[in-house]
Image (cartoon, rainbow, N blue to C red):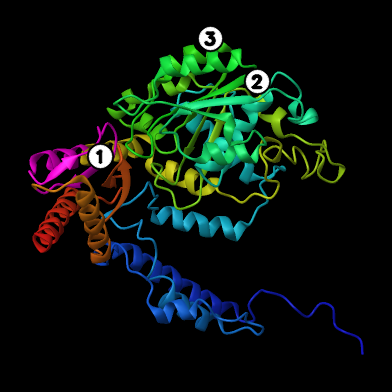
Amino acid sequence: MTRDISQHTLDPDDWDETRALGHRMLDDMFDYLMSLRERPAWVSPPPQSRAALDAPTPMEGAQLEDVYQSFKEHILPYPTGNQHPGFFGWVMGNGTPTGMLADMLASGMNPHLAGYDQSAPMVEKQVISWFADLLGFPPESSGLLVSGGTMANLNALAVARCERAGFDIRREGLSGAPQLTVYGGAETHNWIVKACELTGLGSKAFRKVPCGDDYAIDVKACRDMIRSDIEAGCKPFCLIATVGTVNTGASDDVAALRALADEFGLWLHVDGAFGALAALAPEARRQVEAQSLADSIAFDLHKWGYQPYEIGCVIIRDDAAHKGAFAQNATYISSMERGLAVDSTYFADRGLQLSRGFRALKAWMLMKETGADKLGALIQQNVDLAHYLAKRVDDENNLEIMAPAPLNIVCFRYVAPSTDEAALDALNRDILYRIQESGEALPSHTMIKGRFCLRACVANHRTRKEDIDKLIELALRFGREIAGDRA
């Protein structure tokens, strides 16, 4: 029997039926976004949904209508909650309706973003150019859109390693080389340890420099560590400044670190995962202005760029260095003088990925729709609300600020008279659980100077003053209930 080799496709049998369902999906998602404030900030998935999402491999297909119904019943109602205006956990993006639509349009186009002569790479180059300009980098800077801050930082570290190792590390590897070392404050995000391990440097390559009472890197201590390593035969190559630490929102003295990097011939990288975009804010920008002095910078557009996940960005001042760290030659993807394959690997030559999606469209559309000034106003609004939260904490006898709050992160705890530190840790842990499980708000947690506390990050364009007041109310209510029960 001869098999028909052209009978199958994944296009619908009935386009009108799929179109109607697609319109309903879009309407449902608009309803979902419009009603965020009416729903809990977070709900744990119930047993029936957990069971539905742990089903055997489907060997035969189902109707798309039925598949969509399962999504509505078991998936849509149980997200992290980061879109909700009362979500203050970690530093999670919250997205926009425009971003949602852009992701749909990008998926519909489905371009391959290694390069090629097409519109999508032009959009990505423009987005990178816009943000290079906004952050004070020169027009000839290079850049790449990636999944998030970890990959953006990793990209920059790989460039720094190639540029400042002192030998051809791409050819020779690390065998027989001196120990390469990289320096950052004790508050540096743990991406650096992963990156050192992944790039073959080993976790011991990262030198964790003490921070001061402001949670910024101690520049003198860093200089002493660099000198000590040089005397020991190591090869320092990179210095990391953080703009907006994940614990407290502190920023390192980037100007002083630029001078230190120049003193020893080091690459200066700024991890600005969320803090870098404070450069758009009318007042908060003063805290991050010196980031423009860096050799490279990494930041997330799904944080203070308010984009849907996932979209991060790295900007490298020296395009030749960027390309030099990643470019490869292969006949099957080589660029041609004419046709589609003109500059076929532009972005692939500046990062690890060959296959890349159209992340840039959502950033391009939002920037065109709102403009940088409005984004900056929203960032400033978040900072102002965080400062309002810090003042509310200061005004309450039973609440205590645990660290300075220069940007948009406030660390605080509930305090009860005659309660020792271990008991306060347990009390605040219980407060956190109760607030999260109430669905009325959602802070996260951290440890400050060895003590457990609640951590509120204000990074949502939907958050209002009333949401801050609700968080204070919940912390006081649950704190008093727990303290009273334990008295």
Image quadrant in which the C terminus is located: bottom left
* Rendering quarter of residue 333: top right
Q: What residue type is labelled 3?
A: Glu
Q: Position of residue 421 (x, y in %)?
A: 21, 45
Image quadrant in which the N terminus is located: bottom right
Q: How far apart are marks 3 and 1 (CA)?
A: 38 Å
Q: Can residue 121 be seen in this view?
A: yes
Who's the residue at 51% across and 25% down the image? Answer: 183
Which of disc 1 and disc 3 is earlier in sequence? Answer: 3
Span shown in magenta: 387-416
Which of disc 1 and disc 2 is earlier in sequence? Answer: 2
Q: Nearer the viewer, residue 173 or 149?
A: 173
Looking at the rendered structure, the secondary structure element under dot 1 is: helix
Left or right: residue 364 versus residue 61 is: left
Looking at the rendered structure, the secondary structure element under dot 3 is: helix
- Residue 348 tag number: none
Query: What residue is pinned by disc 1?
Result: 381
Looking at the rendered structure, the secondary structure element under dot 2 is: helix
Camera-nearest label, 3 or 1 = 3
Query: What residue is pinned by disc 3?
Result: 263
Q: What residue type is labelled 2?
A: Arg
Can residue 407 be found in the magenta stretch? yes
Can residue 481 be found in the magenta stretch? no
